[in-house]
Image (cartoon, coloured by chain):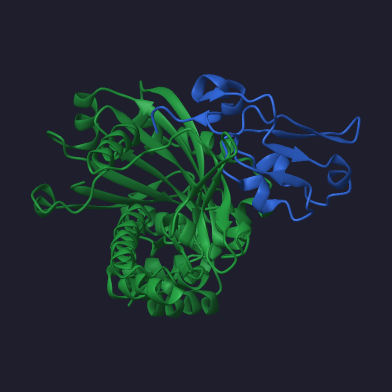
Chain colours: A green, B blue
Amino acid sequence: VVKRTLSLLSEASAASFVFESKNFDKPPYSGYTIYRPVFDRWYAQKAREAGVTLLAGCLVEELLSDGNSFAGVKIGRDKGEIRAPVTIVCDGVLSLLAQKAGLRKSPEPGALALGIKALFRLNEEEINERFGLVRNQGCSQEFIGCTKGIRGGGFIYTQTRTLSTGLVLHLESLKKSGIAPYDLLQYFLDLDPVRKLLKGTRLVEYSAHMIPEGGYRHIPRLFGDGVLLAGDAAGLCYTNGLNLEGMNLAVASGFHAAETVLDAFQKSDFSAKQLAQYQSRLKESFVLRDMKTYEKAMDFMRTDRLFSIYPALVSTIMERIFQADGKPRKKIGRIGWDAAKEALPLSDLVGDLLKGGRSLL
Amino acid sequence: MIPDHIFELASYRIDQEPHITVNREICRPCPHKACTFTCPAGCYQWNERSARMDFAYEACLECGTCLVLCDQGALKWNYPRGGFGVRFRLT
């Protein structure tokens, strides 16, 4: 990914901030969009080459316990049990396994977002042309102000021959809205800036997935006797408005879980005390450090105005700046001030600026 | 509308046993019935005439939205048995 765009939308207009860097087009690359069917197969193959036995198509029903310690998993096939001195639980955002085992509480709507995605087919040349890319460069474009006031936003990510588009919607806010996510997705896809990018594409897949958006404070205890939690199951995910991190944290937590397990095998000790090392490793790594750094940003992201009033305000200001109607222009600062006063009470604006400042600066 | 074409837009291997069961008695007095509009696959529909929650598990995308938003305790929710359920071939 060499190009990142943030677009603030209103009914009639869009104001975008585009960042593009040559430094992201050479090693060490800073970001990728991945195509999961290809990536997952490759990744599984790597694991097999390293000696892993992969059991796909087999539901893990619960963790086994031998009284003091977790002792593997019960699988829903042939009344099977797979016993192990340590289990890394990474069954995704709901983590029914961790819930059943009492390792974490059931997730609350306030700490989750629903992601829905539509995958469109388009040829590589056309993608590069439309998004201003060459070779295998990629770009990501995020949108706010396109969710009818629901906290959340839209996205378009380029892959080689597909475009991933969709919405992420805070669950609590979605529930309050009474709007169906697919209706909102259709509304988003029909907005001018989005429609132009998708012209002539073919919808080939639709999917939905929940995202843990509780932030640092919602991270459960990450280890116990004979057990570790990783990835979405551990609530490792954050956003600060510009960075949206989940997969990097999942991969890194998996790596640190593996290192912890290796060490446990060497010491033949799978107690919580030994496995606590996992938490220390994550605390030293970017995983928990970044989550902690942006702890307050996650709270700030629960400000409804960010997704309604502010994108519209930016549009109003830009429109007034560029408007040529034969009337004398005001100074830009004055235009901004007047528009802000019309859009919201000054106390809200100041409050949000302070809160935003504290969470990001 | 996307849910009308969902079987063309995601692939499924449907189990005969539903992986979610709904206690309709609990749904009837539910004040918000949030599942009826938040489910991205449109699996839940409130039937006004018969005052009954209509539920079809076949199109479920297994996201868990209904489970999280149901604060009435009407759902028994699990992932489908191994090999069944939705399969995202492309995503």
Q: Residue at x 88, y 43 (%)?
A: B28
Image height of B50 relative to A293, above or below: above
Side of A195 where B21 appears, left or right: right
Residue B44: name its quadrant: top right
Q: Residue at x 61, y 64 (%)?
A: A102
Q: Height in image: A105 above or below A280?
A: above
- A338 vs A230, nearest the viewer: A230
Q: Position of residue A51 (x, y in %)?
A: 26, 42
Q: Nearer the viewer, residue A270 or A283?
A: A270
Please tell me in which quadrant of the rendered image residue A258 appears.
bottom left
Q: Position of residue A342 (x, y in %)?
A: 52, 66
Q: Residue at x 46, y 61 (%)?
A: A234
Q: What percent of the width, then of the height, locates residue A98?
A: 56, 58
- Name the quadrant of the C terminus of chain A: bottom left
Q: In the picture provided, is B75 more to the left or to the right than A259?
A: right
Relative to residue A126, is residue A18 depicted above or below?
A: below
> What x and y, as percent, mark residue A24?
14, 52
**Number of numbered discs:** 0
